[in-house]
Image (spheres, coloured by chain):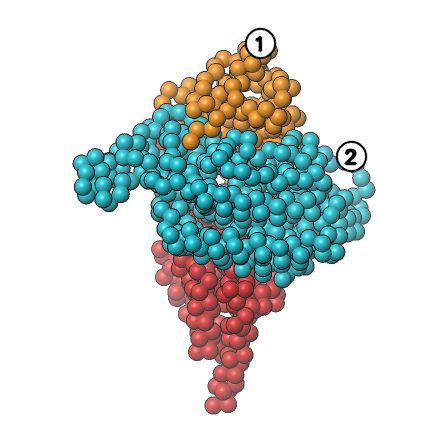
Amino acid sequence: MFVSKLDELANWCRKNSLWPMPFATACCGIELMATGASKHDLARFGAEVFRFSPRQCDLMIVAGRVVMKMLPVLQRIWLQMHEPKWVISMGACASTGGVFDTYAVVQGIDRFIPVDMYVPGCPPRPEQLIQAIIDLQDKIQREGTITGREFDTAERQRKKRALVEATLPLTIDAARNPVLQRELAAAADAAART
Amino acid sequence: MPITQPPVDAVIQALTAAVRPCDVSVFRGQTRVVVPVERALDAFRHLAGAGFDLLVDVTCVDYLDYRGAKQRYGLVYVLVNTVTNERLTVRVFADDPDPTVPSVTSIWRAADWLEREVWDLFGVRFEGHPDLRRLVMPEVFTAHPLRKDYPLQGRGERHNFPVLTRDDG
Amino acid sequence: MSIAPAEYTSLESAGPRNEEYLWTLNFGPQHPATHTTLRLVLKLEGERVVDAMPEMGYLHSGFEKIGEHLTFNQYVTVTDRMNYISPVANNVAWHHAVETLLGIELTPRCTYIRTIVAELARISDHLLCNGAVGLDTGAFTFFLYAFYQREVIYDILETLCGARFTNSYTRVGGVSQDFTPLVIEKIRAFLKTFPKTLDDMERLLTRNRIFVDRTKGVGVLTKEEAINRGATGPVARASGVTRDLRKDEPYLAYADLDFNVACASAGDCYARYLVRMQEMRESLKIVQQALDRLPDGPVNVGIDQRTALPTKQQVYSTIEGTISHFELSMANRGFEVPFEESYAAIEAPNGELGFYLVGDGDDTAYRARCRPPSVLHFALFPHLIRGHTLSDVVAVLGSLNIIAAELDR
């Protein structure tokens, strides 16, 4: 009883003092700036303290497409953030690759890091981002625990990952990467035909 | 609306006299001149001396299955004379294997990164470039993605990363 | 992939020096003052920058490769995402290049409309660039002023074409929507209110001691270097290069309009700031004149040119309209594209933004090369920063206005 009340209090504190880390790479970054600027004013929702150091932040907003050269940087920054931490994937590119179905663009950051909230749109309007932050606050209030047990989900994660791994190419080893193998085979096939 | 450009006939005549370029054509008011690769550096030096002081662009076209193409890689140099506003497009062609053209960095510094980009995306080597490394793709990348035989979606390189889960964080 | 500083031999690295005292600082690719994703590896001697190695490609998304797979009309959505702080200018540049290749003559109304939106894009671009320079040098209020005015321009563009940010406004041979009276009214209101804000902004920053001290004499680019290193746009004009494609190779309606080319001779960050401020005023003049003289008549080219979709009225009531609509909608029945190549550029807010297009008879380009101004400006960076202090890095970077999506494509 007491602990659950304490959880609630902690969640209330956490949700109303989100410190976002803007991982702004492209167009969505400009809308992210617009969200923080005068007209839309993210400060009204208690999430305006943008800090550019991952060590000080608990909410990463990935705004814009993430490409091959940038993904290791994204992962490193995610690792540097302290728990509890959340990730918003802002815009179509960060969520799915968007219109950029090309050789260099990662087709959704959720293939490589855990994501809590997706914002559709190309780019999403500031209102949409604000809505996502409100929704995330709800989620934190509902699911959060003072010990951060909502993240102790290794077992759950592993099950989910096993499901995903069956369909997605997720191994770094090229020999065990089904999509890579398939595409290599297709390329060799095409080369043989021409 | 086509760009209106002053004629560059005099320049072409002087260039022809100096290095004998093989082909001059005009399309939509734009003059293009094809220069043989072995005389390219002389031609560029001549043009720089003739007042073409701004190198606007260096790029490449891969004519792998283009109609009537004789050589695979066609380099494009867009030059501008900032005093008279004349424009001239110079073409230099190279072919597999190991396409190589002379670097113009000694004439126009602007060529430094533009040539690196062409090397990165097309694999055309620039002889005499001081620092020919990949510009936009990671160093570990092996292909040259703007070549026509490279697929749009790549060959799976974009999937080749470790996956982080909550446990790692 | 490790973030290890690579060995770099720049073109003009001074001979052997005592490297023991130097230390290396990695700046970016995720850093607030880079605004976007670029990386600098700085060699420092105390606080002084001895050398800088810029690195790009952290946003390389294969734009040029996509250009070989999308039709001329589809690709405009991708150009939006190129220089994303002034998307309409990219739209105009792209279709300017396409129309040069296809040999299409626009209607007078279309040229004026495109001129107006391109100039609005220039204003919004310079607002962000100067606002960001202000932000980086410590003037946060200035940044908010700038962003508020950008919202007004967003609002105009949203009224015009339904999207506030990624407009995809132009089409081959025309634009997607004609100006409505409401749009014209909104632009006129903007023309009335914006000069006041611009005055306020100038009062805030132009003679602000901190700002002037941090930007004057920093990152000086001489005229000869500017030309030799391929600088264009405000960066070149701040160094005394008078080149402006709007005057030198007039396209759209610029030949009919009266405006000045803003230039400065100092070539430092402060001069670049002043040139951008002045260009906003000139853009206002252009928009005002173009709006006053906006010709009547159709906005898209006629049916006979077979490039722009005919209006619904024409499709339903004339046989030419129906056929044209059908042909344009069918795959492989679209445009007649010559087996030719052409380069066409416009004066984008950042400099010369050109496209080199190769046609192969199909209505997708065989090669769609974009010549972005940012690449050459970013290549200038080591030259500009050498000998300055670490705190000048952000001022120089801001004044070059490097947009990563345009830089890397």
Residue neighbourhood size for the residue with mark 1, other residues' Cα within 10 Å, grouped as few (<14), some (14–19), many (≥20)? few
In the image shown, does C200 or A186 lie closer to the viewer?
Answer: C200
Q: Find chain A in the image and tell me its colour.
A: red
Q: Chain of mark 2?
A: C
Q: For the point 44% across and 60% down, which residue is it? A: A125
Q: For the point 65% across and 54% down, which residue is it? A: C202
In the image shown, does A25 or A75 lie closer to the viewer?
Answer: A25
The mark found on residue A50 in the picture is none
Residue carrying label 1: B17
The chain letter of the orange chain reads B
Residue C131: x and y in percent read 60, 54
The correct choice, above or below, for A145 with respect to C249 in the image is below
Q: Does any portion of residue C58 appear in the rendered image?
A: no
The chain letter of the cyan chain reads C
Q: For the point 52% across and 54% down, which residue is it? A: C192
Query: Type of residue at label 2?
Result: Gly
